[in-house]
């Protein structure tokens, strides 16, 4: 496996050996390690010193179930700290099969010019792009699929990225031609700053990803797939209703943030619920079950059509539906679906944008509940009007511009779809993850609400520091393996699923890998990220929720009552940990030389 | 005593002898001191896996003794994120 380094200042592409210290790493562990080593923590995120790093997970490109996640890392223009955002789609598997452990984009090109990067087994071609500049993601993907064939992998930015908006995301084509997103933290703006409109990945004729112990790997993959299919969440709930099945249970638990985090229940919850969505999808001949990457056995995604049966959007997720729904008081699923489509097309994070619009509603820019005006604002983002640029820079900027103090952010990143006063483990994660408010970083909803991995009460403080800490460590390991975080539902409940993941990592490397190694990896990742953030100026003072969370939230009338000292307990012991990666486990075996991309400059 | 019952994610009252048969959101009368476990049996919701129970928005277990005007939410195992 190699590192491909693209320098946008002199337009060169080089391949490098993977340094020994990174040989064990993949996914989030690798993007964060590279950013921590190569990026000046105090640099401007859109300047020449920042770097954008893509890394498939350790298991990506193999037959391991649900292993097709790709991590993208950089210093975030939204949070000012380190960022890892991961996504499904086909890019992780294609990068891995091309033998690319990490793709590093660095430097800055001549102002105003855009380029494309094409990677195949025979070449790495960087060339100026003009035709698709200014175009949305759907047109980019359609055009490139016609140009290179429908199996081409695409990583692209839309107009929001080109405007360098702080909420711009990076979009990844899936096998069906739909869009998945590395959504959070404004990484689309970083890609735009590098002058890179899109990357195409052609893995035709590449050898399989090397596996040290193929038979052991095959057996572990089979066991893991079986465990995922047998668990009622990953085998039934998610495939049937998708992630949006959460609307009703989070609403029932009083944790569905409504009207800019004023209440924990939304009167229109059932109208935007997973159950209602399932009914719409099936009657309109959409697809209730659909996977975001090959080898996913959960298939929580879906294809949503309008009343006439025409495609509107795919990968229509709970957080998006909550955002353009409950937090903005919009109860029309079709309007929310249009909002999702626009965001996918222009390449902007739905969570950040929805909370920014709720903040604008708070500031009187538009009324709560006005879905049509909400869509009109999204069109303004596409056009790059002044209002569009404000909203497209996220909730924190929007709050400052319109004089709003009720702004739901941590480290300037919008708080997602679980109120921290009613799902307190989740609040601990929002406050302390190095990512800024990120629900996936330590998904305490599992034990707080969903009865997975034991139960910790969501309304009191007891047990929630430890819960969030343990989940954040485990999640950092899972993100590094390239596994979808939803495998955790099965891993938390079924010992054979946990064992199978360890076996997969052991078999790919031929080195011992235990649960302790997974935790060691997770701790290394978090320590690396926290150290970067401290050097970037995000101190312990940044690990706070906004003060309005001191207000009670109905129906349970709970408040956010963790003290700063209590929150600092989450990672207190990490301060003593070593900086180097964990012991040399699961190092890639020496195999026959893989075909390396050659360099062609234009 | 009167209960407000909400069944989610594919669950419905599965007892043909009740007026609420086939429904997901309904009010119903039950005798004093009825437990949640007894309600689950009455609604014929018994499934091979553990359900998630909420009373007035708070998780509880099946031994809970129901009270007048309780809001009962019952879910199969679900997840997302």
Image: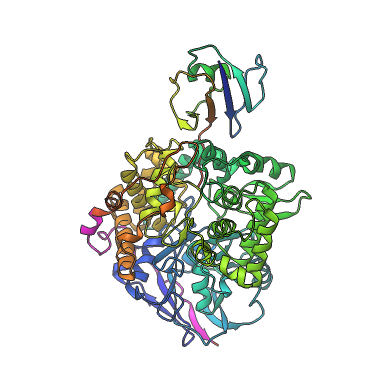
Q: Percent position (x, y) of residue A406? A: 49, 55
Which residue reaches farthest right?
A: A308
Q: Position of residue A205 (x, y in %)?
A: 54, 68
Q: Foreground: A195 or A69?
A: A195
- The N terminus of chain B lies in which quarter of the figure? top right
**Can residue B52 be seen?**
no
Q: Find residue A520 and report its horizontal and vertical position in percent.
A: 28, 54
User: Given the current orientation, which residue lies at the most extreme left position?
Assistant: A576
Question: How many numbered tags mark residues here?
Answer: 0
> Residue at position x 42%, y 75% from top?
A51
User: Viewed as shown, does residue B3 lie left or right of A421?
Assistant: right
Asked whether the viewer can see residue A540, the reply is yes
- Who's the residue at 35% across and 60% down the image? A542
Q: Quadrant of residue A173?
A: bottom right
Q: Which residues are magenta?
A: A573-601
> Taking A500 as reference, is B71 left or right?
right
| Magenta run includes residue B70 | no
Chosen colour scheme: rainbow
**Depth check: A241 or A186 in front?**
A186
- Residue A352, percent from left and from top: 53, 59
Residue at image x 29%, y 51%? A570
- Our reading of the magenta stretch's main secondary structure is loop
Picture layout, residue B72 above or below residue A161: above
Locate residue A191 relative to residue A240 in the image: left or right. left
Q: Is residue A585 magenta?
A: yes
């Amino acid at each position: 496996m190699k590192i491909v380094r693209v320098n946008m200042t002199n337009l060169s592409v080089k391949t490098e050996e993977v340094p020994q210290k990174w040989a064990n790493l993949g996914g989030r562990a690798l993007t964060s390690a590279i950013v921590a080593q190569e990026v000046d923590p105090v640099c401007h995120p859109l300047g020449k010193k920042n770097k954008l790093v893509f890394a498939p997970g350790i298991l990506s490109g193999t037959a391991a179930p649900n292993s097709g996640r790709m991590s993208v890392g950089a210093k975030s223009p939204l949070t000012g700290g380190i960022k890892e955002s991961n996504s499904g789609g086909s890019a992780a598997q294609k990068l891995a099969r091309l033998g690319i452990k990490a793709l590093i984009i660095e430097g800055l090109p001549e102002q105003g010019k855009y380029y494309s990067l094409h990677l195949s087994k025979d070449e790495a071609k960087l060339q100026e792009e003009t035709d698709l500049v200014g175009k949305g993601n759907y047109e980019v993907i359609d055009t490139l699929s016609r140009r290179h064939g429908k199996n081409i992998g695409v990583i692209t930015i839309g107009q929001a990225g080109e405007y360098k908006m702080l909420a711009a995301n990076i979009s990844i084509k899936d096998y069906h031609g739909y869009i998945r997103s590395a959504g959070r933290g404004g990484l689309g703006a970083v890609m735009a700053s590098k002058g890179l409109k899109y990357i195409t990945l052609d893995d035709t004729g590449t050898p399989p990803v090397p596996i040290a112990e193929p038979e052991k790997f095959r057996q572990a993959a089979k066991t893991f797939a079986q465990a995922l299919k047998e668990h009622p969440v990953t085998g039934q709930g998610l495939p049937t209703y998708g992630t949006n099945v959460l609307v009703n249970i989070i609403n029932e638990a009083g944790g569905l943030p409504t009207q800019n985090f004023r209440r924990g229940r939304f009167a229109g919850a059932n109208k935007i619920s997973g159950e209602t969505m399932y009914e719409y999808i099936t009657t309109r001949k959409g697809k209730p079950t659909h996977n975001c990457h090959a080898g996913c056995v959960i298939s929580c995604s879906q294809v949503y059509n309008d009343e006439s049966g025409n495609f509107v959007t795919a990968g229509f997720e709970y957080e998006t539906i909550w955002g353009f729904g409950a937090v903005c008081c919009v109860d029309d699923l079709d309007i929310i679906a249009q909002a999702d489509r626009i965001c996918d097309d222009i390449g902007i994070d739905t969570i950040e944008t929805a909370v920014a619009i709720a903040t604008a509603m708070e500031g009187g820019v538009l009324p709560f509940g006005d879905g049509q005006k909400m869509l009109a604002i999204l069109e303004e983002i596409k056009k790059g009007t002044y209002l569009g640029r404000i909203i497209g820079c996220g909730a924190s900027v929007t709050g400052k511009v319109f004089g709003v103090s009720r702004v739901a952010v941590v480290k300037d990143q919008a708080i997602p779809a679980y109120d921290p006063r009613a799902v307190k483990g989740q609040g601990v994660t929002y406050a302390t993850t190095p990512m800024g408010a990120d629900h996936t970083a330590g998904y305490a909803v599992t034990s707080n609400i969903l009865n997975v991995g034991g139960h910790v009460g969501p309304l009191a403080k007891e047990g929630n520091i430890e819960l969030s800490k343990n989940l954040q460590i485990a999640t950092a390991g899972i993100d590094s393996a390239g596994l979808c975080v939803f495998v955790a539902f099965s891993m938390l409940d079924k010992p054979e699923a946990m064992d199978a993941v360890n076996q997969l990592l052991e078999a790919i490397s031929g080195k011992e890998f235990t649960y302790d190694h997974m935790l060691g990896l997770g701790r290394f990742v978090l320590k690396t990220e926290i150290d970067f953030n401290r050097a970037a100026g995000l101190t312990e003072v940044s690990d706070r929720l906004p003060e309005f969370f001191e207000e009670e939230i109905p129906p349970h009338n709970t408040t956010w009552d963790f003290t700063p000292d209590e929150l600092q307990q989450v990672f207190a012991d990490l301060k003593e940990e070593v900086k180097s990666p964990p012991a040399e486990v699961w190092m890639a075996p020496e195999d026959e030389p893989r075909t390396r991309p050659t360099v062609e400059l234009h | 005593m009167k209960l407000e019952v909400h069944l989610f994610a594919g669950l419905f009252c599965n007892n043909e002898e009740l007026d609420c048969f086939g429904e997901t959101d309904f009010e119903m009368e039950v005798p004093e001191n009825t437990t949640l476990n007894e309600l689950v049996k009455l609604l014929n919701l018994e499934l091979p896996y553990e359900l998630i129970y909420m009373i007035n928005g708070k998780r509880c277990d099946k031994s809970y003794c129901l009270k007048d005007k309780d809001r009962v939410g019952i879910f199969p195992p679900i997840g997302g994120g």
